Image (spheres, rainbow, N blue to C red):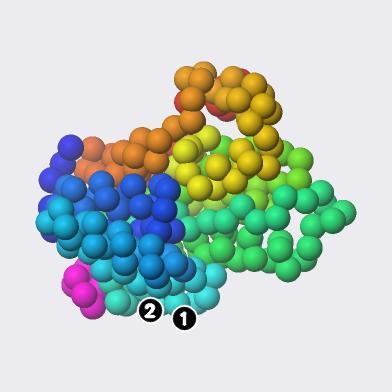
């Protein structure tokens, strides 16, 4: 893969799961990383781990649904490292599983605020930072197989993830001529805290006999496998890829 050493990456939702694995993999390739999330202690632990391996990282506590937080996050990244080359918008929540007649309006607003509005705010300020220095940047948004598949009681989550397709393709069309590529990664069932909560809600029997058998590879993916896909899209090897959706899901969507 192309040399990424001394480039700068900003990863949201980096306190666990896919975001943490992506930050670790970037750092292992010599990329300077800014990691952002709402949980400061987890971010500090991640930075300590990266620095212990010889990497360079900073932690920025951020709520991506708050415009001022996002602007500060991007500014702090650029002020510290002097540039921004890669941005991974991974922050997301599943919210309340509830039928449409029972779903709280506040819950809907929170899920859409973080998953969709938060990605919009991040892209807005990330693109500004990249354009300001003339960087040939790459932005990767993280969706889900629920960017194209709905399920009962998941209307807020699925709507937020569906929206990322339109957001990604539209912004890709805007920024391509200025040297910034924008893509979407839509993972399937991945071994993260979010999917542990889903397994607990469904029960082991339903999960093991109903959910996992629908995956061609018959297993959950690992966060590191999604991180590899994200970093590929950021790399020069993906220089002709923009506005697309990559679906590392073990074949799940082929059976639905």
- In the rendered structure, are the residues bearing label 1 and label 2 in contact, judged by CB atoms less than 8 Å apart? yes
Q: Quadrant of the N terminus?
A: top left
Observer-nearest of 222 and 160: 222
Callout 1: helix, strand or loop? helix
- The region drawn magenta spans 78-83
Residue found farthest to the right: 101
Identify which residue is drawn at 71% across, 47% down. 154
Q: How many marks?
A: 2
Between the residue at mark 1 and the residue at mark 2, the CA separation in whole angstroms equals: 6 Å
Residue 111 position in % (x across, y down): 63, 60
Q: Which residue is mark 1?
A: 68
Q: Badge 1 local density, few (<14 within 10 Å), some, or many (20+)?
A: few
Q: Position of residue 14 (x, y in %)?
A: 39, 58
Residue name at image x 16 percent, y 41 percent: 2
Q: Can you identify the residue that label 2 sits on?
A: 72
Residue 73 to residue 147: above or below:
below
User: Is residue 189 covered in magenta?
Assistant: no
Percent from the top left, x then y, of residue 44? 31, 67
Image-quadrant location for residue 222? top left
Chief secondary structure of the magenta span? helix
The secondary element bearing badge 2 is classed as helix
Task: Classify residue 104 by image quadrant.
Answer: bottom right
Q: Please give left or right for residue 92 compared with residue 172 in the image.
A: right
């Amino acid at each position: 893969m192309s040399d990424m050493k001394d480039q700068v990456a900003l990863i949201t939702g980096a306190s666990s799961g896919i975001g943490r694995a992506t930050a670790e993999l970037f750092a292992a390739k010599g990329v300077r990383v800014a990691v952002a999330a709402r949980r400061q202690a987890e971010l500090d632990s991640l930075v300590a781990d990266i620095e212990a391996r010889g990497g360079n990282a900073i932690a920025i506590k951020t709520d991506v649904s708050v415009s001022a937080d996002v602007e500060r996050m991007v500014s702090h990244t650029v002020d510290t490292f002097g540039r921004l080359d890669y941005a991974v918008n991974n922050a997301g929540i599943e919210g309340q599983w509830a039928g449409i007649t029972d779903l709280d309006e506040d819950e809907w607003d929170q899920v859409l605020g973080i998953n969709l509005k938060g990605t919009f705010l991040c892209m807005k300020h990330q693109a500004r930072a990249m354009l300001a220095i003339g960087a040939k940047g790459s932005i990767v948004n993280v969706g889900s197989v629920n960017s194209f598949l709905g399920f009962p009681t998941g209307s807020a989550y699925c709507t937020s993830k569906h929206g990322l397709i339109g957001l990604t393709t539209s912004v890709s069309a805007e920024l391509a001529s200025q040297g910034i590529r924008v893509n979407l990664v839509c993972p399937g069932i991945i071994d993260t805290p979010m999917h542990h909560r889903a397994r607990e809600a469904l029960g082991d029997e339903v999960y093991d006999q109903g959910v996992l058998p629908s995956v061609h590879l018959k297993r959950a993916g690992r966060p590191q496998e999604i991180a590899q896909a994200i970093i590929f899209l950021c790399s020069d090897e993906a220089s002709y890829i923009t506005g697309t959706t990559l679906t590392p899901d073990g074949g799940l969507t082929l059976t639905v």
